[in-house]
Image (spheres, rainbow, N blue to C red):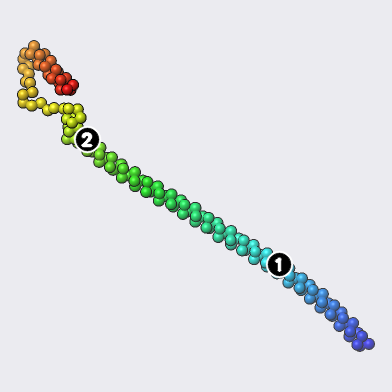
Amino acid sequence: MTNLAYEIKNDELDSKRKKALAVKKKNEKALKRKLMRDASLALFVIISFAFSYINGRAGVSKLQSEVNHIKTDIITVQKEIDLKEAKLEKIRSSKLVEEQAQTLLGMIYPGENDKIYINSQETEEKVIVKKKTFETILGALFR
């Protein structure tokens, strides 16, 4: 009987061990699945952050390129402004105005023979002199 009791007890222990082993294997599989799921989620989060960072850097690079292009445009426009201001300053000088008036408009400086002196005492002569001066000016303009 001891053998039989021993065998029954052994069978019960084997049965309990098998159940415990089955539960343990089941728990290990569940734990592995949970770890794989957690690892996959962590990997997904890391990859998402990496793509976000790369995308952000690409945007920053694009904006930096635009800023550099605009700075180059500003420098070019500033050089044009400086050139035009220098040209304007040249035009403002009286010598250039005089030169262009002589070449383009045909301006002639009066010589000693062209000067007329007016006697302010005689009003009648003033009118005649004014008329002659006016005719001389008109003649010079319409040559």
Q: Secondary structure at mark 2?
A: helix
In the displayed structure, does residue 79 sit left or right of residue 3?
Answer: left
x 18%, y 21%: residue: 142
Q: Callout 2 environment at 10 Å: few (<14), some (14 to 19), or many (20+)?
A: few
Which mark is drawn over residue 92?
2
Q: Callout 1 environment at 10 Å: few (<14), some (14 to 19), or many (20+)?
A: few
In the depicted structure, whether residue 13 falls above or below residue 63? below
Q: State if disc 1 and disc 2 touch (CB < 8 Å).
A: no
Give the labeled residue for mark 1. Answer: 33
Q: Residue furthest right?
A: 1
In the displayed structure, does residue 96 sit left or right of residue 53?
Answer: left
Q: Residue 135 at what x, y percent from top left?
A: 14, 17
Q: Residue 134 at what x, y percent from top left?
A: 14, 18
In the depicted structure, whether residue 77 falls above or below residue 55? above
- Say which of 133 and 30 sits in front: 133
Which mark is drawn over residue 72?
none
Q: Residue 17 at what x, y percent from top left?
A: 81, 78
Q: Residue furthest bottom?
A: 2
Q: Quadrant of the N terminus?
A: bottom right
Amino acid type, callout 2: Arg
The answer, for residue 35, to whether it is visible in the render is yes
Q: Residue furthest front?
A: 143
Q: Quadrant of the C terminus?
A: top left
x 17%, y 35%: residue: 95
Residue 127: name its quadrant.
Answer: top left
Calculate the distance from the C-alpha at mark 2 to the C-alpha at mark 1.
87 Å
The answer, for residue 94, to whether it is visible in the render is no
Amino acid type, callout 1: Arg
